[in-house]
Image (cartoon, rainbow, N blue to C red):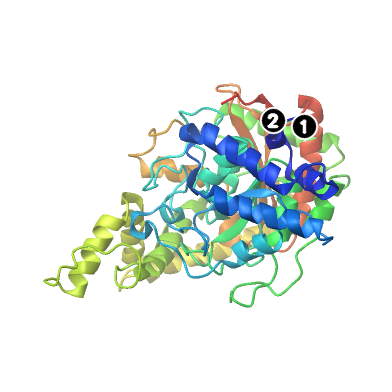
Amino acid sequence: MSIIKKTAAELAELISSGEASAVEVAQAHLDRIAAVDDSVKAFVHVDPDVALAQARAVDDRKAAGETLGPLAGVPIAHKDVFTTADMPTTCSSKILEGWRPPYDATVTRRLREAGMVILGKTNMDEFAMGSSTENSAFGPTHNPWDLNTIPGGSSGGSSAAVAAYEAPLATGTDTGGSIRQPAAVTGLVGMKPTYGGSSRYGLIAFASSLDTPGPLARTVLDAALLHEAFSGHDPMDSTSIDQAVPPVVEAARRGDVAGLRIGVVKEFGGEGYQPGVLARFHEAVELLESLGAKVVEVSCPHFTYALPAYYLIAPSECSSNLARFDGMRYGLRVGDDGTRSAEEVMALTRAEGFGDEVKRRIMLGTYALSSGYYDAYYGKAQQVRTLIARDFDAAFEQVDVLVSPTTPTTAFPIGERADDPMAMYLADLCTIPSNLAGNAAISVPCGLADEDSLPVGLQIMAPVLADDRVYRVGAAIERALQDRWGGPLLAKAPEL
C-alpha cells in the first residue's frame, strides 16, 4: 500500500520502527498535494520547506534516542482558522489576506509538541460561516468523490484534504456541524468534542459559545489519537474544562456496543431527507442492534426549533466577534488616503473585506441584539437552547447514546444552493442541537446513497464529557461495516 493510503496510526508505527522516516512520509504527502490540489483546492497555503524542516526535527529526535509521541512525524492539514506564527492565517477572508499572527493557537502549539508535521492551512467558509466551503475569498473546495460537488463546510478544505489522501489527519472547528457535516459528505470520521474539552485560544472566533476544535480522520482510532493530542485544559481559555480528557483512544481500540442502549431520534427523519441517506442510516441501526445494542426510539421535541435558534444565537455572537476587524490594527485597510475619517475607513474596509455570507450574518446578529428586539429574538433563542439541553438530559436518562443521520442529504452540486441561504442552512439540521447543548458528537461513514453513490454519515451523540462513548460506538460500527465492505468506504472513491 502507498504511504499516502496508510492511516495515521500506521504511519506513526512506520516512523517509530524506523521503516520510514518522517521526511519520507511528509514528502509523499507534499507530492500528493502537488499532484491533485489544483483540482481539489483543499489548501490555501502550503510551505514544503517548513513542513520538511518539522519532519527532519522528528527524525533527529528519534536518532538521538528520544521517545516519540503516538503521532510524532505524522502529517496534518490545519484549518485556516487557527493562528500559526510561521504561516498566514486568513480565515479564507480578504480582510485577513496575508496576515501572519504573532503567536500560535493552543491547538497549533499542541500539534507541534506532539511532533506532528503541519503541511499547510486548509480552505474554509469565510470566518467558518457556511456549510459548503463556497464562501471563501479564495474560491470553493471540491469534493474528491465528485469534483462537481461540495466537500461540506466550514471545514471543507480539511475534509477534502483527508479524503484526497493529501493528509492522513486534519483539524476542523464545529460551530453548527462544521466538522461532522464535511466528514459525512466526504466519507470520513469527524468529531465534535464536548464544548470546552478542546481549547479555543488562538481560534479566530465566530460564535464563542459554540465554536469547538476537533479532528477529521479516515478512521475512528486516528480521530481519537488526534483528539487526545490537542485536547485538555488550557488556562488561556476561560471556557476550557479543567478535567482530564476522556479515555477516547482506549474506547476507540475497544469498539463494542454489547449492552449499550441506543436511542434513535424520532425528530430526525422523514420529509426533506434523501431516501438513500435514510436507507443507510436504518441499516446502520440494524447492524448496531445485531452487535448487541438495545435500540429504542427517543423523542426530543425541541430539536425542531434548534435551527432557528442557532441562526439567531450564532449571528448575534459573530456580529460582536467580528467587530475587531476594522482596518485599524491589522489586515486589510481601504480608503486611508488622509481625507477620510476613521469611521469611513472602517466602513470601506468591511465593505470590501467581508463576503456576502459574513455580511448577512453580521446584519442578522446586529438586528437580533438591537434595542427593542433583544428579548424577542436573542433572548427567546437562548431559552430554546435551554429546552434543547433539557431534551438531551431527558434522553440520556433513557439511553447511553443517541443516533441520527449526520446530514439530510449527500453532497450537493457546487452552486446549487448559493442563492438560497435557507436551503444551505438545512444542511446542519441534525448537527446543530449538539452545539447548542455542548455535548459530544461524532460522524462515521455508513455507506453510499443509492441515488448518487456519494457518502452518508451516521451521527452518534453522547452526554457532556462522555466523548469516549461515541468513539466506542463509532469504532464498533466502523469495524462491522468495513468487514461487510471488505475495507474502508474511502477505497470506493474514484481515483483523482
Q: How many marks?
A: 2
Is residue 207 or residue 394 the one in the foreground? 207
Task: For the residues labelled 1 and 2, say whether their Cβ atoms are less than 8 Å apart.
Answer: yes
Say which residue appears at 74% left-offset and 57% top-offset: 60
Mark-to-mark CA distance, 1 and 2: 9 Å
In the picture of the structure, the residue carrying the numbered disc 2 is 489
Is residue 368 or residue 484 the one in the foreground? 484
Seen in the picture, residue 79 relative to 421 is either above or below; the reply is below
**Secondary element type, mark 1:** helix
Within the image, what quadrant is residue 19 found in?
Answer: top right
Say which residue appears at 55% left-offset and 67% top-offset: 104
Amino acid type assigned to the residue bearing label 2 in the image: Leu
Q: Quadrant of the N terminus?
A: top right
Residue 134 is left or right of residue 146, and the answer is left
**Secondary element type, mark 2:** helix
In the picture of the structure, the residue carrying the numbered disc 1 is 481
